[in-house]
Amino acid sequence: MTEKPKAPTALDLPPVEPLPAETRKYFDLCEEKLGLVPNVLRAYAFDIDKLNAFTAMYNDLMLGPSGLSKLEREMIAVAVSAENRCWYCQVAHGAAVRALSGRPELGEAMVMNYRVADLTARERAMLDFAVKLTRASAEIEEADREALRAAGFSDRDIFDIASVAGFFNMTNRVASATGMEPNPEYHKQAR
């Protein structure tokens, strides 16, 4: 008998059963490409409209066209999540930074304190902005945007940095509030 996976959150929100065909196909694709269905997706599966909205925004911000690399976007996710102390996102996106960079120590440093990581000036400026946006968004000024421009970011890139940081500020709060558990597989990845 196959054991049911542990609930993705501390809330009693069972998934829609059966999952719609498109959702099942998406989950199967995740299983094929990632070796797992991320618990964040399983957590949203109680409401397919919410799941679809979440995945559309995530896929656009993290995988869509941008002047930011996939690694840079994952680095923003980790720096913001570390600032917010979001267990789920630190584990999941820390694994992504390890895998995309090929540098396990970078993923670890990003989770603990990005300021000690071996970063380029561009990466440091990007993460300083994302963390300031996380801590005190009302304090962002033109000088902060100018620092990003000086580091080589376009205005479109600045919009993308802000959007990725804003998205993870939201997801961190949902993950923390619901007691979302990272998939155990993330702990072993890219080490």
Image (cartoon, rainbow, N blue to C red):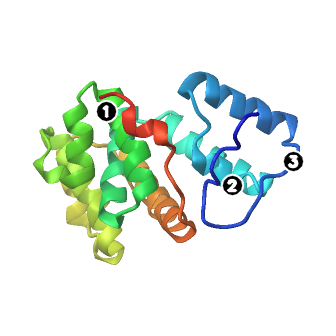
Q: Which amino acid does label 2 sit on?
A: Tyr
- The crowding category of the residue bearing disc 2, from other C-alpha atoms within 10 Å (few below 14, some 14 to 19, many at least 20), is many
- The crowding category of the residue bearing disc 1, from other C-alpha atoms within 10 Å (few below 14, some 14 to 19, many at least 20), is many
Where residue 161 sits in the image (x, y, percent)? Answer: 38, 50
Q: Can residue 69 be seen in this view?
A: no
Q: Nearer the viewer, residue 26 or 35?
A: 35
Residue 169 occupies quadrant? bottom left
Q: Who's the residue at 34% across and 64% down the image?
A: 85
Q: Which of the marked residues, 3 or 1, is nearer the chain's N terminus?
A: 3
Mark closer to the observer (3, 2): 3
Q: What residue type is labelled 1?
A: Arg
Q: How far apart are marks 3 and 1 (CA)?
A: 35 Å
Q: Residue 98 carries which label?
A: 1
| Residue where numbered disc 3 is placed | 17
Quadrant of the drawing holding the C terminus: top left
- The crowding category of the residue bearing disc 3, from other C-alpha atoms within 10 Å (few below 14, some 14 to 19, many at least 20), is few
Q: Which amino acid does label 3 sit on?
A: Glu
Q: Who's the residue at 27% across and 66% down the image?
A: 132
Where residue 107 sits in the image (x, y, percent)? Answer: 27, 39
Q: Who's the residue at 43% across and 38% down the image?
A: 186
| Residue where numbered disc 2 is placed | 44
Q: In this view, does 156 lie above or below 12?
A: above
Element assignment for label 3: loop
